Amino acid sequence: MQYRSTRGDESTGINAAEAVIQGLAPDGGLYVPVHFPEGCLDLKRLPGISLQEASRFVLHTMMDDFPAKQIDASIKAAYGKQWDDSRITPLSQDKAGNYYLELFHGPTLAFKDVALQLLPQLMTRAQKLTGNQRGIVILTATSGDTGTASMDGFSDVDGTQVAVFYPHHGVSPIQLHQMLSEPGDNLAAYGVEGNFDDAQTNVKKIFNDKQMEQRLADHDLQFSSANSMNIGRLIPQMAYYLYAYGQLAQRGTIQLGDPVNFAVPTGNFGDILAAYYCEKLGLPIKKLICASNQNNVLTDFFNTGTYDKRRTFTVTNAPSMDILVSSNLERLLFDAADGDVAMVKKLMDQLNSDGHYQITPAMKDYLDQRFVADYADEQQVRDEITRLYQEAKYAIDPHTAVASAVTHRYQINSHDDTPTVIVATASPYKFAETVYHCVTHRNDLQEPGLPAIKQLHQALGGDLPASVQALFDRADRSEQVVEPSEMEDAIAKQLKI
Ligand SMILES: *Cc1c(COP(=O)(O)O)cnc(C)c1O
């Protein structure tokens, strides 16, 4: 299977191992399959399939240049004892009959662990497969969770260095603690004076800077990305949609072939794109519900066909979704434009220069058939956490609450009674401050961060998951804060180049 850039012709095709190492295409586009293996999924395999088996199928299909043995070894290393639930991504059902696909049982308590426990496995093997001798520098912009998850995944992995840039003042106290206390000699995290988009824009710029590339090459190094722009991030995420469908079939909620909806709390559009790719493989999906927070640029886009980032950026209680430029949307546009790379490039250039673009009616129609979109503001997020806890004694984090609130409204307004899986992307403990207020209605929180976790634990009862407990035993390094213009220097210093 070959991958090509969304902005380049088919002849730019490379195999999956090379695409994983490169991360972003040199022309600034994203790698997508040259020929998507449409409809190759045999639904009969799905009932009761384990997450690991689903992952094996996805990797064999989408990364067929990796030998089977290496795929198996990678999966074994990624989905083991570091998860606090042996099912890895359990599907729970609340008393009201909605399904929550819990993707937060990994070491950093958010869904990004599913991909980022696997990506280092794939990347180090890709290095050997392609005969690449260079050290890999993982350069990552994060709204909070990618940073912690990449640091954990790559911690002390041979031949890799990690530089993470997060918005200073834009991440939660627990996310900050996780980044500052993650053990590993090859890791560094920097606060950027700016928001996530500032960090991401500059990371992309550094990534595509030819001079910097040469400087790294002179020291036998090369950049790669752990953001969901990397297919090695995106493709592992497809597995849990197959798993969830298999669970619903196994439990008799659906018959094989019946459609389901997935509601996804969306930021950079990676998670929901993985669901859409599953649909292309043949998974019966009726609607993908794209749920945004107050930074609702995607809601407006899906409803009007105009993408317009010229709006106020809001730091919300669901910070991992505080994004105005959703990078992975480019892959969907590529399909909606039927592979017209000139069109994709034109739209992306317009976004860069003018801050907005409009898609054609045909493209809009392609999206309308598959997606619905809505958003929840901060108060609606809090109300949803409270509602679900009162009705079902089920505690959800603010990101999950965005999708849950949007789904609730969608079901009432559309009368769509298709079984719906809400993707639960973070543990309630990761955003303990917000969740504590919503479930207790008390204002007696002593301090944010670890003390809030303790108080939330008292309120919820039950056992504290091991990865949450582990946070109490780690000490923070001091925070390093840089201006966007100083990011390149910080990397050079870290790499000693
Ligand atoms: C990253 C993240 C999201 C958004 O996922 P995208 O793939 O960027 O759309 C949602 N919730 C949480 C908790 C996250 O960490």
Image: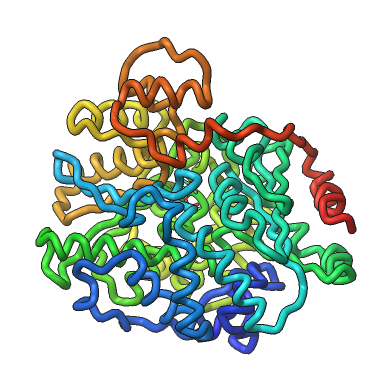
Give the camera-side residue of 482 and 461: 461
User: Residue at position x 61%, y 77% from top?
Assistant: 126
- In the rendering, at what x and y percent does residue 300 appear? 44, 47
Could you say which quadrant of the image residue 242 lies in?
Answer: bottom left
Q: Is residue 423 above or below residue 338?
A: above
Q: Is residue 274 above or below residue 63?
A: above
Image position of 73 (left or right of 180) = left
Q: Is residue 302 above or below residue 108?
A: below
Give the camera-side residue of 408 and 180: 180
Image position of 204 (left or right of 459) = right
Could you say which quadrant of the image residue 125 lies in?
Answer: bottom right
User: Residue at position x 21%, y 67% from top?
Assistant: 48
Q: Is residue 68 above or below residue 379?
A: below
Residue 372 seen: no
Image position of 91 (left or right of 191) = left
User: Residue at position x 45%, y 73% from top?
Assistant: 335
Residue 431 seen: yes
